[in-house]
Image (cartoon, rainbow, N blue to C red):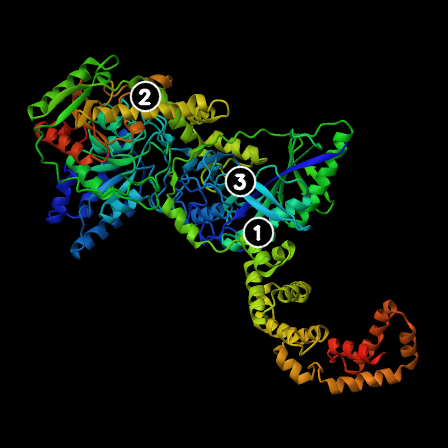
């Protein structure tokens, strides 16, 4: 049962071949049996999950089922879940049980999804390896000595190991796409504003975007149907109409123009990964697409621009964790300053502190113009690069990461080399574009991802291209060994 | 040396919206602590601000009320600092692009002159909560009911020269915002809080001296006193050849002095940057014109109209246009009696005097405008004298009915029957032979004074009801 996709589970439930309780129990049993190896979940409430499954079965019996009724999924522990601890991978929120659901969670509940539990992640979504979690590193199901990518590493590992058919993730600079690539699954970061950020613990407000992670593009489309849409409580969420993201999956690719940025195929990209990506592109070409060389001239400014803007926003988003109202509070504070400094010293890990310091510095009087303001100007240039490309092409393609998942600990002491892991994914967030990662091959037994970047609000086209690719290939069906 | 004081005011005005500026929690004053703070106000993880359209409307009304430029694209910024009653660790405010730009504001002074005060800007922001330091055994309590209440911060140019002008400005501002209905302007409840920036310079120069800021002064009277003692403090320093330190000070009403809030000035770096959770506020001309069309006649306009239409002095027109309710009351009295100057006089002297003594507002007046107009009409048609009218007014105040009812019931109608009056005059002349002789012996100048005695006697005999004008005429005729 754990090999079924979301689409297959929905169909089986519809046809009465199995109940939600059976499906949910099967996944809970796998989590209990296998997750010790991967550490992909932070919180699992079995009885709550089974109770939700029972309700789903009752609704179906009453003829009130909707698209995902009874399908179990996991949520990244960044999404607030009413009554279920939401830690964001941090000691700071280790004791935090929200009295509300994030909009993403409530929309998926309304669509009938059952919550299996909350997945592990880099602390406050800051990391590319899932090693900064207060709850310990997540291990890659393809090789437990390798990282799963991050920050949505728990979601990616759980889906790859068939502990959950799908999971939610968030992507601020690649946090859905990079772990999806590392774990051989499919994930989409929608256009900024397509999915509500309400109830999603903020990292960098102008870059954060939630999205689905699953094994196929079709499954991602099914979940995105439930997640997308305007939320009046998120002022940055788009009022533009959503679409049925499954409607265009079968469209053929003839006439599709795919842009290949020369900057994404140069120095830094491993040869084996490049070869996988080239094979994937030839497959798309075979199905009618034409490949066009394009240029993103400001690419080399992406990493420094991102590492000004994201930490700047994070530094103030994380000011609320002060030990006054909820979350961690140090023992016996002597005075206000002591309360603040010890609470935050104890509650935050090193990477979070590093980014708070960088961001605070970048916003400080005398540095603001040189750093934050300049970064915002460059951000507009980076966005314009993409818009210029989309004058010539329909989508842009390239690698998701420079290489396959690296070994645990390999980059922990070198933040800059860790930041370069996201060199191909960061620009998409700065430009607010939708993008996805699709399994495109294996390098020495480790998965590699093809990144597809679309025009604003053109998620349907991306999912269409990914689905067509998955009709022609079986990389997305490959599972790591030793999980049965 | 003669010093000139240079004063600028920053007023934090609480806007009278039903809900908070970025959440749906109510703004009602005086609820039990933390009962009016929702997840957004508490800065719970993942919560986001949503701008209250009514707060924007209030700000635009204010901007139009002072003839200011309205920002077609204004931006919210985060002002970052840690404090326990600031739940997010930043205040959402406006820094580079405020919603209200430069404007001008005319104030009327007691001597009848007017002055124009420049308004630098006004911007929207959220209020913080309150820290409560008593009753918690060495800890502090935090009440977040006020957190997120919409504020309009109104900043003047350094155009104010003394305490009287500062108070006149605040009163005029209070009048404007209550006319506009955007705030109750109640200083005692903190709806209007004032920070005073003040410096001195040698009279006749136009450089600016080092200023001190006096924070959070919460009544007109304290503003006046705080400025007076700060001017004295600074001039003492300067006279002694010292230098004023740029710092934040507090006014202590009990000791009537200002004192430094901090021993050493901490330079706050608020790290302002555009709030990424909110879109810029885009306001088009149609919106502005619709708001403009909804504005009532403003206090300054009303003052000018009262002066022109009713021939009132600038000062009287200012008093009567101070609040919409008072202005409406006055105009109703004037219409009912047909004599605006009499109406102005009665409203200002008798009515406001009684209201002030009883600590009542115009809305609570026991005497309606129509009834007061009815009373004045009886003076104008010589039914009663002004003096009797004051008696009648006392009875009206006590709820004994309209002027006509009281005059009728108590038989206070003025005696204008010449036969009856002549009898009274004759009797007074007969009873006061000595005074009559004295009067007849006196010259024209003295006679004018002496005749008052006879008028008084006739009034006494008539219990005040004799028509004074006719009595005067009769006496003048008979005493020859």
Q: Which chain letter goes with mark 2? A: A
In the image, residue B401 sits, relative to residue B208, either above or below, namely: below
| The label number, if any, that marks residue A302 in the structure image | 2
Q: Position of residue A320 (x, y in %)?
A: 46, 37
The image quadrant where one finds the C terminus of chain B is bottom right
Determine the CA span between mark 3 and mark 2: 37 Å
Q: Quadrant of residue A467?
A: top left
Q: Which residue is mark 3?
A: B84
Mark linked to residue B471: none
Residue B370 falls in which quadrant of the image? bottom right
Residue A327 position within the rendered picture, expressed as x and y whole percent measured from the top left = 45, 39
For residue A377, side relative to residue B393 (left or right): left
Q: Residues within 10 Å of mark 3 (few under 14, many from 20)?
A: many
Point out residue A418 in the picture as x, y percentages from the top left corner: 33, 20
| Element class at badge 1 | helix
Secondary structure beneath disc 3?
loop
Point 63% across, 76% down: residue: B399
Residue B174, label in figure: 1
Spatial CA distance of label 1 from label 3 is 31 Å
Chain letter of the residue beneath label 1 in the structure image: B
Q: Position of residue A421 (x, y in %)?
A: 29, 20
């Amino acid at each position: 049962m754990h090999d079924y996709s979301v689409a297959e589970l929905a169909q089986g439930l519809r046809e009465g071949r199995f109940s939600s309780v059976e499906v949910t129990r099967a996944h809970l049993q796998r989590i209990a049996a296998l997750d010790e190896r991967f550490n992909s979940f932070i919180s699992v409430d079995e009885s709550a999950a089974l109770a939700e499954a029972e309700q789903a079965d009752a609704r179906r019996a009453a003829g009130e089922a909707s698209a995902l009724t009874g399908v179990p999924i996991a949520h990244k522990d960044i999404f607030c879940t009413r009554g279920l601890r939401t830690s964001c991978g941090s000691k700071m929120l280790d004791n935090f049980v929200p009295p509300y659901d994030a909009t993403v969670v409530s929309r998926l509940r309304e669509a009938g999804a059952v919550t299996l539990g909350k997945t592990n992640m880099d602390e406050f979504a800051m990391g590319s390896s899932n090693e900064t979690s207060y709850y310990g590193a997540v291990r890659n199901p393809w090789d437990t000595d390798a990282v799963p990518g991050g920050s949505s590493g728990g979601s990616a590992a759980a889906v790859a190991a068939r502990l959950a058919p799908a999971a939610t993730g968030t992507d601020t600079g690649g946090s859905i796409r990079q772990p999806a690539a590392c774990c051989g699954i499919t994930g989409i970061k929608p256009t900024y504003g397509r999915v509500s950020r309400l109830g999603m613990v903020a990292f960098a407000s102008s870059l954060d975007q939630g999205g689905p992670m699953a094994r196929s593009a079709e499954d991602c489309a099914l979940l995105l149907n439930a997640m997308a849409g305007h939320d009046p409580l998120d002022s940055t969420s788009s009022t533009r109409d959503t679409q049925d993201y499954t409607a265009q999956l079968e469209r053929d690719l003839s006439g599709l123009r795919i842009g290949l940025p020369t900057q994404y195929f140069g120095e830094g990209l491993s040869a084996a990964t490049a070869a996988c990506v080239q094979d994937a592109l030839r497959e798309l070409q075979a199905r009618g697409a034409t490949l066009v060389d394009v240029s993103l001239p400001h690419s080399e400014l992406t990493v420094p621009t991102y590492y000004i803007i994201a930490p700047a926003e994070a530094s103030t988003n994380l000011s609320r964790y002060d030990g006054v109202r909820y979350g961690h509070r140090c023992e016996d504070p002597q005075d206000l300053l002591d309360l603040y400094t010890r609470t935050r010293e104890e509650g935050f890990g090193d990477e979070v502190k590093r980014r708070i310091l960088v961001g605070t510095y970048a916003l400080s009087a005398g540095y603001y113009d040189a750093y934050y303001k300049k970064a915002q100007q460059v951000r507009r240039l980076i966005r314009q690069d993409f818009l210029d490309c989309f004058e010539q092409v329909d989508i842009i393609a390239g690698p998701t990461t420079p290489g396959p998942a690296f070994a645990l600990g390999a980059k922990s002491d070198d933040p800059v080399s860790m930041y370069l892991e996201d060199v191909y994914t960061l620009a998409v967030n700065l430009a607010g574009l939708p993008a996805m990662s699709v399994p495109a091959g294996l390098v020495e037994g480790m998965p590699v991802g093809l990144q597809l970047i679309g025009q604003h609000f053109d998620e349907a086209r991306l999912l269409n291209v990914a689905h067509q690719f998955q009709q022609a290939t079986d990389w997305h069906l490959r599972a790591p060994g030793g999980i049965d | 040396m003669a010093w000139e004081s240079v004063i600028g005011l920053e007023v934090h005005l609480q806007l009278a919206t039903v809900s908070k500026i970025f959440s749906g929690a109510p703004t009602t004053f005086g609820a039990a602590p933390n009962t009016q703070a929702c997840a957004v106000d508490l800065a719970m993880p993942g919560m986001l601000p949503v701008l209250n359209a009514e707060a924007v409307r209030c700000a635009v009304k204010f901007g139009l009320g002072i003839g200011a430029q309205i920002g077609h694209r204004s931006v919210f910024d985060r002002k970052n600092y840690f404090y326990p009653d600031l739940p997010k660790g930043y205040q959402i405010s406006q820094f580079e692009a405020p919603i209200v730009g430069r404007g001008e504001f005319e104030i009327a002074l007691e001597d009848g002159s007017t002055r124009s005060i420049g308004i630098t800007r006004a911007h929207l922001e959220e209020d913080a909560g309150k820290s409560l330091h008593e009753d918690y055994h060495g800890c502090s309590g935090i009440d977040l009911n006020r957190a997120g209440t919409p504020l309009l911060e109104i900043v003047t140019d350094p155009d104010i020269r003394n305490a009287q002008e500062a108070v006149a400005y605040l009163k005029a501002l209070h009048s404007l915002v209550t006319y506009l209905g955007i705030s109750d302007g109640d200083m005692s409840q903190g709806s209007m809080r004032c920070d005073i920036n003040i410096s001195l310079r040698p009279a006749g120069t136009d450089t600016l001296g080092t200023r001190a800021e006096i924070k959070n002064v919460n009544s007109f009277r304290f503003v006046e006193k705080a400025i007076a003692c700060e001017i004295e403090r600074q001039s003492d320093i300067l006279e002694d050849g010292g230098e004023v330190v740029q710092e934040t000070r507090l006014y202590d009403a009990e000791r009537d002095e200002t004192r430094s809030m901090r021993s050493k000035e901490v330079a706050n770096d608020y790290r302002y940057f555009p709030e990424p959770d909110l879109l810029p506020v885009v306001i088009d001309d149609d919106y502005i014109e619709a708001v403009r069309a909804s504005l009532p006649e403003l206090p300054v306009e009303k003052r000018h109209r009262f002066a022109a239409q009713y021939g009132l002095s600038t000062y009287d027109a200012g008093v009567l246009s101070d609040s919409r309710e008072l202005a409406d009351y006055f105009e109703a009295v004037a219409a009912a009696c047909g004599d605006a100057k009499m109406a102005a006089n009665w409203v200002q002297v008798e009515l406001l005097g009684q209201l002030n003594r009883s600590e009542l507002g115009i809305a609570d007046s026991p005497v309606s405008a129509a009834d007061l107009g009815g009373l004045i009409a009886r003076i104008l048609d010589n039914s009663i004298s002004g003096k009797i009218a004051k008696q009648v007014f006392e009875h009206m105040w006590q709820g004994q009915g309209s002027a006509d009812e009281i005059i009728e019931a108590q038989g206070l109608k003025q005696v204008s029957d010449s036969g009856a009056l002549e009898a009274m005059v004759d009797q007074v002349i007969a009873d006061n032979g000595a005074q009559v002789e004295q009067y007849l012996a006196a010259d024209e100048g003295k006679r004018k004074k002496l005749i008052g005695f006879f008028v008084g006697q006739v009034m006494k005999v008539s219990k005040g009801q004799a028509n004074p004008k006719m009595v005067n005429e009769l006496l003048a005729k008979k005493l020859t």
